[in-house]
Image: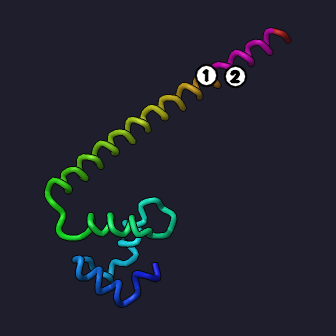
Amino acid sequence: MKLLHVPEVITWLSSMGLDAEDAEKIFRLLDSDGDNAVSLEELAVGVGHLKGHARSVDLVTCINEQRDLSLDVSKLHEEVSMLVRRLMATEATQDYLQAQATETSI
């Protein structure tokens, strides 16, 4: 992250069409493996992806992927909710049966 404050790096980012004011965002985008460091490979590949204007196809791809992920999360939420309801019903049934067995044995 300190490297993104070095004047030469700021100049280089600017020449690549990137605003050094977004240094933290740039760093997070470049750090593809999440190790809080940007390797030369991450820098080269990442800046290549970040420079210039986004193409319409890139934006549409992102929108479609986000929509698909949102649908997947919604389906997962529904499935987990259904499993929780089943578990609660099973526990209630077991409690009822146990109470009946206790009453019968008294």
- Seen from the viewer's position, the closer of residues 44 and 87 is 44
Q: Is residue 57 left or right of residue 84?
A: left
- Judged by its main secondary structure, the magenta piece is helix
Picture quadrant where residue 47 is located: bottom left
Q: Mark 1 = which residue?
A: 90
- Seen from the viewer's position, the closer of residues 86 and 61 is 61
Q: Is residue 17 above or below residue 44?
A: below
Q: Position of residue 50 (x, y in %)?
A: 27, 67
Q: Residues within 10 Å of mark 2 (few under 14, many from 20)?
A: few
Magenta stretch: includes residue 100: yes
Q: Position of residue 52 (x, y in %)?
A: 19, 70
How is this picture coloured?
rainbow
Q: Is residue 83 above or below residue 48?
A: above
Magenta stretch: includes residue 91: no
SS state under label 2: helix
Q: Which residue in the rendered view is the most extreme toward the right?
A: 106
- Seen from the viewer's position, the closer of residues 104 and 68 is 68
Q: What are the residue bounds of the magenta stretch?
A: 93-104
Q: Position of residue 80 (x, y in %)?
A: 49, 34
Picture quadrant where residue 71 is located: top left
Residue at 22% x, 50% y is 61
Which amino acid, mark 2?
Answer: Asp
Residue at 33% x, 45% y is 70
Marks 1,2: beta carbons within 8 A: no
Give the label, 1 or 2, closer to the camera.
1
What label does residue 95 carry, if any?
2
Q: Is residue 46 above or below residue 76?
A: below
